[in-house]
Amino acid sequence: MKKNFFKSLFALLLVSFIAFYACSEDTINNDAQQTEIVKNAYINPLEYIGVEHNNFMLDFTRKLEDSFLNGEWDRAAFLSDDYKRIFANTMNNAYHSRYTQTNSTVSYQKQVYDQLDLSEWFDRDNVTSLDLAAAVLNDRATSRDREYTLNLLHDLFNAANNAATNAEIFDAIKAVVTAHEQRILSQHWNDNEEYALGALAVAKYSAEFWKNYDFAVFTRGAERDPRSGIIVGADVAGYVVGGVVGGTAGSFAGPAGTVGGVLGGKAAGAWAGSAAAATAIAIYDAWCDFFS
């Protein structure tokens, strides 16, 4: 009798354990699947690149305003050696303002300028920043990463080209970013695919920054719509072309982990592309040749 009781009890416990384990396994698997879905659909692991972009541009625009009000740009012809020197100096000052441990120098900033071919962006010939970005993607990106990134770039540039006013540009850019955010974040990206995600982060935060930035200090009281929305495309192109900067920009942020590793070069490109476009608009009222 006692043996039968223990056998029955053991069998009951065994069945209960199996049922509990099965339910737990399903719950764990479902939770894991749900986490993966949420991760792929809603979270950009490179979001911090966009956040840091805006942090840096806040410092850069302050330095740009100071240099302008001090008359440093008064005799510098657009894209001349003087222009590059003052631009590199302004960038260097912004780096040291934002990143207290940076090893940036004016010479280093000139190297970034040259490697990104920034003068080519604004010289109004047949080569545009979009062409340079496409060349980098063709050489370095996977086919899928290249496709999603180029689609985003084309739509950003078209939004800027087809809008009549700055307000219209930012409305169009917001729609572009929202649409591409859904497309890009619905994909599962491999570790070596970081162009589309980074470009999306830069576009998203760049749009917010330049929408709210006031260029009035550069107009000297004159009424002018600077069409600052075109800078968003330059930011994203800079992020992509910045891949060629590579190791030279690896430690630009100073403290490890701020924007380090291989993303350092791309991020430095976004910074430089953004800063160059802002300078062209603010001081020279010049446009990237793509927007001519």
Image (cartoon, rainbow, N blue to C red):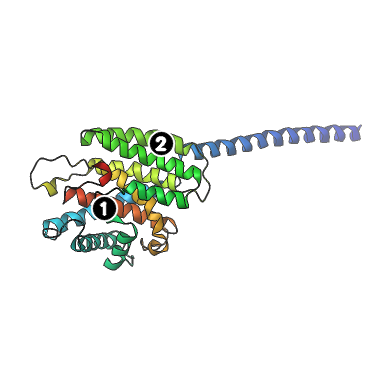
Residue 275 is labelled as 1
Q: Position of residue 135 (x, y in %)?
A: 41, 50
Q: Is residue 258 visible?
A: no
Label 1 secondary element:
helix
Dot 1, how many residues are within 10 Å of its Cα: few (below 14), some (14-19), or many (20+)?
Answer: many
**Which residue carries the number 2 mark?**
180
Element on which disc 2 rests: helix
Res. 15 image quadrant: top right
* Residue 195 x, y percent position in the rendering: 43, 48
Q: CA distance from mark 2 to mark 1?
A: 24 Å
Viewer-nearest residue: 94 or 154: 154
Q: Residues within 10 Å of mark 2 (few under 14, many from 20)?
A: some
Task: From the viewer's perspective, tell me whether residue 172 is left or right of residue 81.
Answer: right
In-front residue for pair 84/192: 84
At 11% from the left edge and 60% from the top edge, which residue is drawn? 75
In the picture shown, does residue 49 fall above or below 176? Answer: below
Q: Earlier in the sequence, mark 2 or mark 1?
A: 2
> Is 193 drawn above or below residue 183 in the view shown?
below
Q: Residue furthest left?
A: 221
In the image, which disc is placed on residue 236?
A: none
- Residue at 50% over, 42% down: 144
Q: Position of residue 55 (x, y in %)?
A: 30, 51
Locate the C terminus and report the quarter of the image it occupies. top left
Query: Looking at numbered disc 2 in the image, what kind of residue is underneath it?
Result: His
* Residue 160 shown left or right of residue 71 in the figure: right
Would residue 74 appear left or right of 55 to someone viewing this image? left
What type is the residue that disc 1 sits on? Ala
- Quarter that holds the N terminus: top right
Residues 40 and 175: in front is: 175
Circles 2 and 1: CB atoms closer than 8 Å: no
Which image quarter: residue 272?
Answer: bottom left
